Image: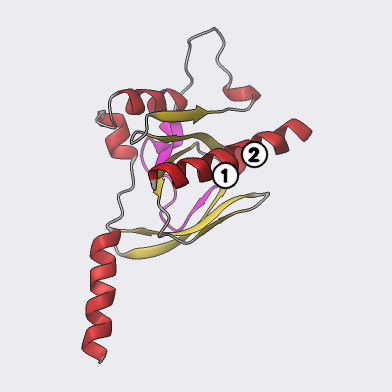
Amino acid sequence: MENEGRLNNLKKHIFYEILDMAERVMVLVRYSPDVVIGSRGFMGDEKETGIILVFNPGMRFDWDEYGLSATLVFGSAPQKCFIPAASIAAVYSPDINVQFVAGGPEHQAKEPGQSTAGIGNAQTALKNGMRTEAAEKNIINVDFVHKKKLEEDERSQGD
């Protein structure tokens, strides 16, 4: 139990270090009934492969001892999300070519060099610059520039 808490703190530390260095961090979230991705949830094969969420410093999120809480926008609808730290399989950035991959005992590789589902997707995606088909369909893209421009336009119309 103590190691689990330390591992979660390590994931959090690496997340913030990558965010500080690259200003964008990707998180591979493996399926668990405890993961909340708004009303969207996990779709299609995401229960098997996981889902990749992208965070940047302009977003509002909080990582406490239980996990990562955020409001993410899917399409145009903001969704409350909670990712338990134990469900975070990888934290990485293709921008600075760095990755941290972790898994619980049920996700440990059986032999050296053998990847598990989801974790292998993060490694492959990072190696290929996020251009793999599996990685592309699991990434949630959020257009923050467009959203910010819309908000600025709304404010300027109100003046």
Residue 41 within the segment the image draws in magenta: yes
- The residue at which mark 1 appears reads as 33
The residue at the point 30 percent across, 49 percent down is: 141
Q: Nearer the viewer, residue 111 or 49?
A: 111
- The residue at which mark 2 appears reads as 8
Residue 1 visible in the current orientation = no
Q: Nearer the viewer, residue 10 or 31?
A: 10
Calculate the distance from the C-alpha at mark 2 to the C-alpha at mark 1.
18 Å
Q: Which three-letter amino acid code belongs to the residue tagged 2? A: Asn
Rendered image coloring scheme? secondary structure
Q: Relative to 95, say whether 153 is above or below.
A: below
The residue at the point 26 percent across, 28 percent down is: 132
Is residue 126 found left or right of 12 in the rendered image? left
| Residue 69 at x, y percent in the picture | 55, 56
| Residue 146 at x, y percent in the picture | 23, 64
Report the magenta residues as a range: 34-53
Marks 2 and 1: which is nearer the front? Answer: 2
Q: To which quarter of the image does residue 27 belong? A: top left
| Residue 47 at x, y percent in the picture | 45, 36
The residue at the point 65 percent across, 23 percent down is: 105
Q: Relative to 58, say whether 91 is above or below.
A: above
Q: Which mark is residue 95?
A: none
Q: Relative to 148, say whether 45 is above or below.
A: above
